[in-house]
Amino acid sequence: MSQPRALQRRPLSRCAAAASPLPRTRRREGGMALAAAPLSCTYEEYLESQLTARDLRYLESEAVRRQVVDLGLCGSGDVLWREEFEAPAAAAAGLPAAAPRTSLSSVGEELKDNFLWALAEREEANRTGKISSIIFIRDRNSRCQEVSAYIDYAHRLTTDDFEVCFSGKKRLFPRNTDLSFYNWDRNVSTSNSSPNYQVIAENACGLLFKNKSDGKIINVDSKAYPGDNTTRTPVETDLYLHVVIYDHIVRRGT
């Protein structure tokens, strides 16, 4: 199994027509175009300009909208990072540019379990929005109660410190705030939609998740077809009782 790759910088895109003036492009090594930051808008306004009508319909919070666009999880295309956006203005003012993002949380860590390898292999794709993974984990909590959850990996990457997970200092564990949580001993269940998935709990087919970017349905029934552009991968691990990962390739605009 190959080592996780270092984070690659995302291709740059232009501001939407609403942002004026549009950034001018210049050439860099390799022939790729760099977009200079528009001078008349803030980075937050720039992120808002990347949203599609569908994004605005599903994401009501301005803060959440900007966060998921910055991570490449929604929007009309790949976007500039903040340091790339602000670099021209900083240079004009004679200020030092912000330090670039250098690596994934998994880079440089000694991965001691198949599950951690599986997370590392998927980290970059989930951070950039190419894949949206749902992780099913079943295990026992500190009270020896059996619990399980379906976890939106891309969303957890934005809220949790995964360096401590990849280093083995802390485990990724089910929470009652995940997509679906169940305490088998207490017969308590919760469900919560995330920035990437809508939970469809009451359905004849069982528990379903609807990807908010492309509208595709993910069926987590082990005996059923998982859905278009979705694969189901059981993971053998010493860290949990049971782990399955559902990888959905996001097809935006379909």
Image (cartoon, rainbow, N blue to C red):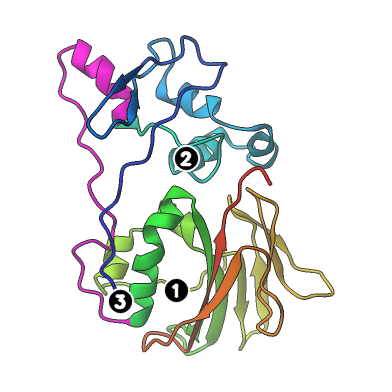
- Position in image of residue 134 (x %, y %): 54, 67
- Position in image of residue 207 (x %, y %): 72, 72
- Position in image of residue 124 (x %, y %): 37, 56
Q: Which residue is mark 2?
A: 67
Q: Is residue 86 above or below residue 190?
A: above
Q: Amino acid at mark 1?
A: Phe
Mark 3 secondary-structure assignment: loop
**Highlighted range, magenta:** 84-113
- Looking at the figure, which quarter contains the N terminus? bottom left
Q: Amino acid at mark 2?
A: Gln
* Alpha carbon separation for disc pair 1 and 2: 23 Å
Q: Earlier in the sequence, mark 1 or mark 3?
A: 3
State left or right for residue 184 relative to residue 4: right
Tags 1 and 3 touching, CB below 8 Å: no
* Alpha carbon separation for disc pair 3 and 2: 32 Å
State left or right for residue 64 relative to residue 201: left
**Is residue 57 visible to us here?**
yes
Which residue does the image show at 47% across and 57% down from the upper left? 154
